Structure formats: structure tokens, C-alpha cells
Image (cartoon, rainbow, N blue to C red):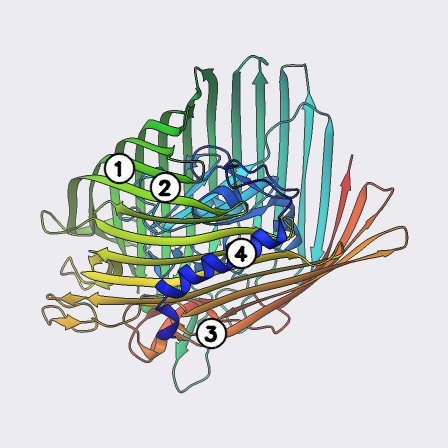
């Protein structure tokens, strides 16, 4: 493995080899002066750089999957997405890790490390996507690596962009019904109407329901890992056919599934991995709501397009769960409101492609979190909790020659956060008995992030690129009274180089990417008694320095008209190079220094591999497509302590899918078996000690069928 990561000379040699192969395979195609290669049939157009480019012409490490591909590959939500994207890890409660970097703290005191956007709108609390899942989606783009220039402060490790299907000037509709084991029932559909030559509307919906996946021995959570959600989205598009469009979107999701169980199962090394066997004193329930509205305006102005995007989002997380470390119930009642405003201008002026804009974000959060201990609650009431971010950004790509382009970008960000509240002891009727702590914190941070890169057309269908960039994640706070309860921002300097190639008349795409990251003040979450009450609170600490480097590759090949192969591989080495806690943590004891230097970053398997193969059979006056796919992960730790109790060994999860589409019919039928091995690896583990941890496991073997009808 160590020899593998000495990539400099071999990477250059591979570029030359690909160039030679491309020249021999496409001697009759365009010359190297054609820098704007048109999209090949079936190639995905992405907006990763805030303007439309084809996937192969975008000098970034991107995995893009179309809506049809998501359905075909069984990707229903971000948790499933992790099995189709190299080096991506997604937890059941919204924790997202890319290339070894993420956050396990998803409450109001922290921010994601991987930014999630839906139609350009930033989701501060992306739990709504977990509840709603992917439906009526045009594509999902996963951008790996810091996106600090174009996507801002919380894209330190990357960004997940979900782009839904816009209204079209056509009349059509679709409905789909899926049934499976665990009493699974999924319904979805859309209706698209062209009301006039200038106005079109699209309405879509999805309902998801299945019984709990947890073993029956979990008496407190017989419905643990269940789903019960209802979602809809309505969009209206006005196009004056003269350079102006207006797009209004509304969406709403109601979630009643028991999809977030904190420590539903206990792992004790040396014993069987037992589930909780308590009685039903602490049943789990969920009654959460997520909704929003956005308005996007576009106007052609000169050599570019001026875009305004405004959005308002509201979420009400109302959940109850058992929390084994406290041997009691955990109650969450959080109301979150966000406002986003963005104005940008993007276009082409001569040899320059450019984008620039201003961004404003404001969040108000009313947080009530309670942990039961015996006949009392430790209640943390935080109101108000505020976050504000203002940014100005710009990026330009200049064609220096017909084959060589240079990119430069800058972003200035100002962040401000504050939280005021207190910790109370309440009885089981929520009557306050006493106050044991004051929570008060505020902080402000400024950063200038930059990007500089080159891309070169080595051959007509081969592009090599290299860039350096920085990223930044705002600081924050944890329980207690200031000024010593804040943590520093997280910063990254990243170096990346890659090759993207189309070979054999666009029948094959082969992409390679190598990266090297230096992190400073990496933010990690743990538990500590910061109030002196004996209650353990989740706190965020700065881990000094960390280093992450690796190689990723992706191959897509149309072997014949009926055979297709896709392979993605990620090799990763991610460690803390300096992680010394002078004040200790919950395992070393308060005031006792502890050194975790050399530990592996949480959720950073050394290798991930995805492979899929499809074959089309012409049968019964139609096409039967059989697909087999598998996902492999090597071993990893699920917590920065690297305790044996949080170690997850390597595993595979494999699927088979069969889809039949008649030639002269409007329906299609598919059947599937997912996770054939019935492997249930640990997804999250919170250590109680080096030998005991509480966590959640993946879904079991699933099978079912889906019927789709187009009108």
C-alpha cells in the first residue's frame, strides 16, 4: 500500500499512456483544439462549478448518478448512496464523511463537514433528505474534496448536490409502486403539465413505509430502523422565451419512522453483540416535519446569466429515543428556521468562463434536549440559537491556449454564532426543579479561501488537471458558560491531480484522481462533564492536525450494445498527525492529558470498491436487464479513540436487480435482492469503554418488486 501512494511518476506515465490510447482509438475524431467537447450520448451534464459542464469536462472528482440510475441501483437515500461513491460514509442520523473527514455531532452546536444542497439551497440540518429520500430526481452529484470557493464554509470535505426534475413544457405523468419484505411499501409519482406556452407545473410525491429492521430482542424498539414518511414537491416554471425564467418550489415531508435510535444495540467484546433487553419504559417515537419554499430567477444579461436564489426552510424534529449510556429516554424537540439569499452572475466572455456572487444565510434554532436519569430529566433548553454567514465569491477559468486552461477563485466568508440557554433538572412532568448550568456562548470568524488550478487537453478525449485549494468550517461552542467553551474553525489545504478520458469512441470513460490533504484544528466530537453536574454533554474539540491522502478511480464501459460495466475504487490513508488533549476527555479523566496522535480518522476505510455489471436480453418483445453489483469496504474505526469496541471489520454487500421493459408498453417491472450476504455492519458506535460501545447497524437482506407506469 505504501508503494501504491508514491503516485507522482506513475501518475504522469499513466496520463501519457491514456493519451496514446485515446489517439489510437479516436484518430478520426476532433483535434486537440476542441476544448468544448459535446456531451456524448448518455453522458451526464453537471453544475458542480455553478455552470453547466459535462461530467468528463469538469476538472473535479465527481460521482454523478442520474435519477434513473438511482432507481436501478437501489439508491433511495444518502445512506444507500455511500455504497455507490468511493470514500463516502453516511450514518443513519445524518453524519456524512468523505475521504475520512466528517462530523458525528449533528445538533445545533455544530455544522456538517460535507455540505448538502437541494436545487442550490443549502441544508443546515440535512436530516430532511434522510427522511424524504430521493424522488423525482434528475441527478445527484457528489463532489469530493474541499469546495470552499463556490460552496462555502461547510464544504471542507465536499458537497452533495441533489437536483430535482424541473417542470417541462409537456404533459406527462408517472406512478410507481414497490413492495418488499419487512412489509415494505413505497409509492411515488409525478404529474407534469404545460398550462400555457410560458407556464408549466410539476407535482411529485413519495411515501415510504417498512417495519423495523432491528432484531426482535430489542424490546424497547420493536420498530427500530422503521420508516414511515410522506413527501411532496410542487414546482411552477415561467419562461418568457426571451431570456427570463422564474421557478417557484415548495416541498414538505412528514416523518414518523423510528429511523434514529441512539445506541439501539450494545456491543461488548468477548460476548455476543447483544441488543438492549430493557422493558418498554423508553419507547421510541418520531413526529417530525420538514418544509420549505424557494424562488429562483434567471435573466440573461450581456455575456452571462444573472441568478437570484432565495429560500426559507423550517424543520421541527420531535423525537424520543432510548439512550443506553444514561439508561433512560432521550427527548428532542427542536425548531429550526433558515433563510438563504444568493445573487450570482455566470457566463463566458471571450476566453474566460466566470462565476461570481454574494451569499447570505441565517439560522434560528429553538432547541430542547432532555436525557432521563431515573425519575429526573437533565434538560438543556437553548433559545435563542443563531447562526449567520455572509460571503462574497468569484471564480474564473481562462483559456491560455487551445488546450491549456487556468482557474483561479477567491471567497471571503464572515460567520457569527451565538447560543443562550441553561441546563435544568426537571421531573418526569417537565416541571423545573432547579437550574444546574448556564449555557452561553458566541463567536465570530473570518476566512479567505482560494483555489488555483490548471487543466490540459493531453489528447482530443483526455484531460489532465491539477489544483490546490483551501477550505474552512466555522468554529462553534458547546455546553457551559463562556468564554472558554468555544472551539476553533477547521481549515484544510488540499492538493489534487487527475485524468479524465473518453476512449474507443466514447464507449469507455476512465477517470483517476489523486489527493493530499492537510487539516488544521480538525473538529471531533466526544462527551464530557462540562457543567460539573455529572451529566455527560456532547462537546466538540479541535484535534490539532490530520493528514489524508489517496487515489480514486472510476471506469464505465459499454462493452457491447447489451453489456455495461462500472467500477469505482477508493484507496485512503487518513491519520491524526497531532492530536493532544491537554485537558483530557471522558476516558482519560478530566484534567488528565491524553495523546491520540497516530490514530486513524473515524470512518476512513483504507479501501472501498464498487462494481456493477449489466446485460440486456431481448425477450418476450421487450428488454430484460439483469444487473449485479457489489460494494466492499476494508476495516475501519467508527470513533477517533480507535478503541477495539468501535472497530468494524471489512465486509461486502451485493445486490441483483432484474428489470423488464416491453417494447410497446408504458410499464416496466423490476425485482431485486439487496445485501444478498445479509451482512449488517456497524454504522455508528459510541464508546462507553475500550470494550463496550452502543451503536446502530446497517439494513438486513431486502427483496421486493417495483412496478412503474408512464402516462
Q: Contact (CB < 8 A) between labels 3 and 2?
A: no
- Distance between the alpha carbons at the discs numbered 2 and 1: 10 Å
Q: Is residue 128 left or right of residue 517?
A: right
- The x and y percentages for residue 581 are 14, 66
**How packed is label 3: few (under 14 Cα within 10 Å), some, or many (20 or more)?**
many
- In what element is the residue under mark 2? loop
Q: Earlier in the sequence, mark 1 or mark 3?
A: 3
Q: Earlier in the sequence, mark 2 or mark 4?
A: 4
Residue 646 versus residue 271: which sits nearer the camera?
646
Q: Is residue 622 above or below residue 168?
A: below
Q: Earlier in the sequence, mark 3 or mark 2?
A: 2
Q: Which mark is residue 275?
A: 3
Q: Earlier in the sequence, mark 3 or mark 4?
A: 4
Q: Which mark is residue 124?
A: 2
Q: Total marks drawn? A: 4
Residue corresponding to mark 1: 387
Amino acid at each position: 500500500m505504501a508503494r501504491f501512494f508514491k503516485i507522482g511518476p506513475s501518475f504522469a506515465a499513466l496520463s501519457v499512456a491514456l493519451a496514446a490510447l485515446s489517439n489510437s482509438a479516436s484518430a478520426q475524431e476532433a483535434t486537440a483544439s476542441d476544448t468544448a467537447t459535446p456531451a456524448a450520448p448518455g453522458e451526464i451534464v453537471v453544475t458542480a462549478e455553478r455552470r453547466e459542464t459535462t461530467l468528463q469536462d469538469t476538472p473535479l472528482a465527481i460521482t454523478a448518478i442520474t435519477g434513473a440510475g438511482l432507481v436501478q441501483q437501489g439508491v433511495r437515500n444518502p445512506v444507500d448512496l455511500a455504497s455507490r461513491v468511493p470514500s463516502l460514509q453516511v450514518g443513519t442520523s445524518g453524519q456524512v464523511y468523505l475521504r475520512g473527514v466528517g462530523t458525528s455531532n449533528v445538533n445545533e452546536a455544530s455544522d456538517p463537514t460535507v455540505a448538502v444542497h437541494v436545487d442550490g439551497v443549502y441544508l443546515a440540518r440535512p436530516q430532511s433528505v434522510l427522511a424524504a429520500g430521493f424522488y423525482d430526481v434528475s441527478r445527484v452529484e457528489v463532489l469530493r474534496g474541499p469546495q470552499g470557493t463556490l460552496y462555502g464554509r461547510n464544504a471542507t470535505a465536499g458537497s452533495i448536490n441533489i437536483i430535482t426534475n424541473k417542470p417541462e413544457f409537456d404533459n406527462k405523468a408517472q406512478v410507481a409502486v414497490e413492495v418488499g419484505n419487512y412489509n415494505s411499501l413505497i409509492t411515488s409519482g409525478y404529474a407534469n403539465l404545460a398550462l400555457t406556452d410560458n407556464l408549466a407545473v410539476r407535482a411529485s410525491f413519495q411515501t415510504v413505509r417498512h417495519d423495523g429492521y432491528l432484531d426482535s430482542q430489542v424490546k424497547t424498539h420493536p420498530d427500530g430502523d422503521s420508516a414511515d414518511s410522506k413527501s411532496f414537491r410542487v414546482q411552477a416554471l415561467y419562461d418568457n422565451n426571451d431570456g427570463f425564467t422564474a421557478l417557484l418550489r415548495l416541498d414538505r415531508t412528514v416523518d414518523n419512522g423510528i429511523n434514529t435510535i441512539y445506541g439501539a444495540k450494545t456491543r461488548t467484546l468477548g460476548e455476543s453483540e447483544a441488543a438492549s433487553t430493557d422493558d418498554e419504559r423508553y419507547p421510541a417515537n418520531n413526529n417530525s416535519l420538514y418544509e420549505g419554499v424557494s424562488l429562483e430567477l434567471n435573466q440573461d444579461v450581456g455575456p452571462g446569466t444573472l441568478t437570484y436564489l432565495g429560500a426559507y426552510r423550517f424543520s421541527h424534529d420531535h423525537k424520543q429515543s432510548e439512550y443506553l449510556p444514561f439508561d433512560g429516554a432521550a427527548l428532542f424537540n427542536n425548531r429550526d428556521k433558515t433563510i438563504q439569499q444568493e445573487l450570482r452572475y455566470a457566463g463566458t466572455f471571450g476566453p474566460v468562463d466566470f462565476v461570481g456572487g454574494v451569499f447570505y444565510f441565517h439560522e434560528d434554532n429553538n432547541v430542547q434536549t432532555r436525557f432521563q436519569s431515573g425519575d429526573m430529566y437533565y434538560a438543556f433548553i437553548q433559545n435563542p440559537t443563531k447562526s449567520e454567514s455572509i460571503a462574497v465569491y468569484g471564480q474564473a477559468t481562462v483559456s491560455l491556449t487551445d488546450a491549456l486552461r487556468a482557474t483561479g477563485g477567491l471567497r471571503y466568508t464572515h460567520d457569527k454564532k451565538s447560543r443562550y440557554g441553561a441546563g435544568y433538572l426537571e421531573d418526569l412532568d417537565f416541571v423545573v426543579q432547579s437550574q444546574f448550568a448556564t449555557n452561553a456562548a458566541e463567536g465570530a470568524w473570518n476566512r479567505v479561501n482560494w483555489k488555483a488550478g490548471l487543466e490540459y487537453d493531453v489528447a482530443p478525449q483526455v484531460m489532465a488537471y491539477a489544483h490546490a485549494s483551501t477550505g474552512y468550517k466555522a468554529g462553534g461552542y458547546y455546553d457551559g458558560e463562556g468564554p472558554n467553551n468555544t472551539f476553533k474553525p477547521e481549515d484544510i489545504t488540499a492538493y489534487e491531480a487527475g485524468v479524465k478520458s473518453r476512449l474507443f469512441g466514447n464507449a469507455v470513460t476512465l477517470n483517476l484522481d489523486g489527493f493530499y490533504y492537510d487539516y488544521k484544528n480538525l473538529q471531533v466530537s466526544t462527551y464530557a462533564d462540562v457543567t460539573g453536574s455529572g451529566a455527560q454533554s456532547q462537546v466538540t474539540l479541535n484535534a490539532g492536525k490530520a493528514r489524508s491522502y489517496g487515489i480514486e478511480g472510476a471506469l464505465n464501459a459499454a462493452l457491447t450494445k447489451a453489456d455495461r460495466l462500472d467500477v469505482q475504487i477508493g484507496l485512503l490513508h487518513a491519520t491524526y498527525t497531532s492530536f493532544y488533549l491537554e485537558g483530557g476527555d471522558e476516558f482519560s479523566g478530566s484534567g488528565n492529558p491524553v495523546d491520540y496522535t497516530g490514530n486513524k480518522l473515524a470512518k476512513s476505510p483504507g479501501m472501498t470498491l464498487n462494481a456493477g455489471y449489466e446485460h440486456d436480453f431481448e425477450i418476450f418483445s421487450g428488454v430484460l436487464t439483469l444487473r449485479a453489483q457489489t460494494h466492499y469496504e476494508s476495516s475501519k474505526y467508527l470513533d477517533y479513540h480507535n478503541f477495539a469496541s468501535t472497530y468494524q471489520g471489512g465486509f461486502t454487500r451485493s445486490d441483483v436487480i432484474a428489470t423488464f421493459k416491453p417494447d410497446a408498453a408504458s410499464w416496466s417491472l423490476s425485482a431485486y435482492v439487496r445485501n444478498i450476504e445479509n451482512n449488517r455492519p456497524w454504522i455508528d458506535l459510541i464508546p462507553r469503554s475500550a470494550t463496550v460501545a452502543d451503536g446502530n447497524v446497517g439494513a438486513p437482506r431486502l427483496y421486493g418488486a417495483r412496478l412503474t407506469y408512464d402516462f
